[in-house]
Amino acid sequence: MTESAGTADLEMVCQKYEPVIGLETHVELSTNSKMFCGCPAHFGGEANSHVCPVCLGLPGSLPVANRAAIEATIRIGLAMNCQIASRARFARKNYFYPDMPKDFQISQYDEPLCTGGYLDIWVGEGANRDRFRVGITRVHLEEDTGKLTHGGETGRIHGASYSLVDYNRAGVPLVEIVTDPIVGAGERAPEVARGYVAEVRELMRALDVSDVRMEEGSLRCDVNVSLAPRGSSVWGQRTETKNVNSLRSVARAVRAEMTRQAAVLDSGGVIVQETRHFHEDTGETTGGRIKEEAEDYRYFPEPDLAVVAPDPVWVNELKANSPELPSAKLERLGAEWGFEYEQMREIANAEAVELVRETIELGVAPTDSRKWWMGELARRANESETDLLALGVSAKDVATVATAINNGELSDALGRQVFEGVIAGEGSADQVIKSRGLALVSDSGALQRVVDEAIAANADVAEKVKQGKVSAVGVIVGAVMKATQGKADAAAVRKLVMNSLGVSD
Ligand code: ADP
Ligand code: MG
Ligand code: ZN
């Protein structure tokens, strides 16, 4: 079977087959220290500098579980409506790979911390927007592995002439969230998968347990897909696609597997249970290794760690302090501010919810707050390939500008100049307004003089306007704006010119 066999359209695929998907999401926790030792858990650092006998698995060393990681896992489980085990246990998952110094990973197997929850997501837009409930099988805690870098021309393991290993990441707390098989999404399966991972990412941010950067690998996703003939009571064989590094890729990987599997099945082939690899460049998946079964890992309870028995009082406290779910929060704020859900999603995607909220709290109208953050400022962030938070503009700056415009002290154009100064590092909006001398000519006598001069200098145009060619007034307004170096409010100037000429609109 060739990789390019999958050309069938998604709609056609779903007329014949019912897709089932399952998502395994790994979230690297942003605790100070690693899961079972005191080494720093943060990203980066000189290779093999965040290591000790425990995370290197040296003989005689003993692990101790990180309480903050257990707490974060329970908070994730609670936010996903899971049962929190009164007794959970770590287990050894045995396999040999050079990124794992101990040759076993401490994970959780048959006694995970959290089980049986769900997460509600929204898919579709406008009238087609639906809530979709994704069942959560389990949320468990484990440790991350180290990182291999393959040297040689390919940069991949195949064809590498040497490989380097960095154990800084080995032992960093890792939470795995496994969904129940998701049935009934049909051709919306790619969108559901993407929406789910996006919601998980937002949720982790709301819980403040991880920086969830897919590019840096602190949020990773494996995508399981199978197809069964419509009406069949048995699910098809699944494949598990790894290396899915962005939300867009999650959707693409599901789509690619659906079309590929349909083509295989259509031509009488069979799907083998295997792990596959997603390629960002081609949008296709290629076959990997045949999937291990659980028994291949020879799981057994970790003898060096005590049973985890979370105090129910503590769990209840954590539950009481659960943050609002991200989609519910968008729903609520949208209603409060008078925005459509899609507009709220856009704000959320730009990571601007808090910025917009703070600005509104400083007294700015929601539409103005949104206009500046999602318009001019988003454009500038985009231009300099950074995000809104890193732009250096604060909610206070936006409030200063919006208020000044409201009070007739600035125009939109001058407001944009203020932000230009703030972004260039000239200080706060207040400071830029002062240092650049940005203020509308508010002395009406002074402005009237400029208007009179402009009318005199454009006598022929003025005559045309008087005779009814109102559109020509732009020439005179332009002359006034030029004379004031843009420091007049164009609408007010227009009114003044019209009045002076004795014409009305
Ligand atoms: P493994 O570690 O072997 O991948 P897990 O149980 O951790 O197994 O995860 C398997 C994932 O695949 C889960 O999300 C599960 O819901 C999903 N899944 C199970 N059966 C199917 C299937 N037939 N088609 C698609 N997804 C499936
Ligand atoms: Mg798994
Ligand atoms: Zn260590």
Image (spheres, rainbow, N blue to C red):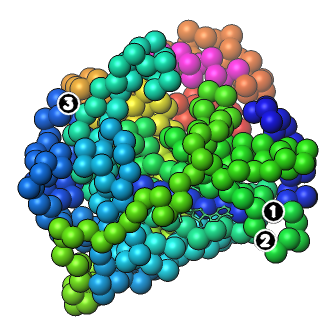
Label annotation for residue 363: none
Cα–Cα gap, marks 1 and 2: 7 Å
**Residue at mark 3: C-beta within 8 A of ligand 3:** no
Image quarter where the N terminus lies is top right
| Front residue (pair 173, 237) | 237
Q: Is residue 473 magenta?
A: yes
As helix, strand or loop, the secondary structure at mark 3 comes to loop
Q: Which residue is mark 3?
A: 47
**Residue at mark 1: C-beta within 8 A of ligand 1:** yes
111 relative position to 1: left or right: left
Cα–Cα gap, marks 3 and 1: 46 Å
Q: Which residue is mark 1?
A: 228
Label annotation for residue 234: 2
Residue 371 percent coordinates (x, y): 50, 45
Q: Main secondary structure of the magenta part?
A: helix
Cα–Cα gap, marks 3 and 2: 48 Å
Callout 1 amino acid: Ala
Q: Is residue 251 magenta?
A: no
Q: What crowding class fits label 3: few (fewer than 14 Cα within 10 Å), some (14-19), or many (20 or more)?
A: some
- Of all residues, the one furthest to the bottom in this rendering is 313
Write the start and end of the magenta stretch as one range. Answer: 472-484
122 relative position to 395: left or right: right
| Front residue (pair 15, 233) | 233
Dot 1 or dot 2: first in sequence order is 1
**Is there CB contact under 8 Å for labels 1 and 2?**
yes
Q: Is residue 229 visible?
A: yes
Query: Residue at 36% of width from left, 56% of height from top?
Result: 94
Residue 335 percent coordinates (x, y): 54, 70
Callout 2 amino acid: Val
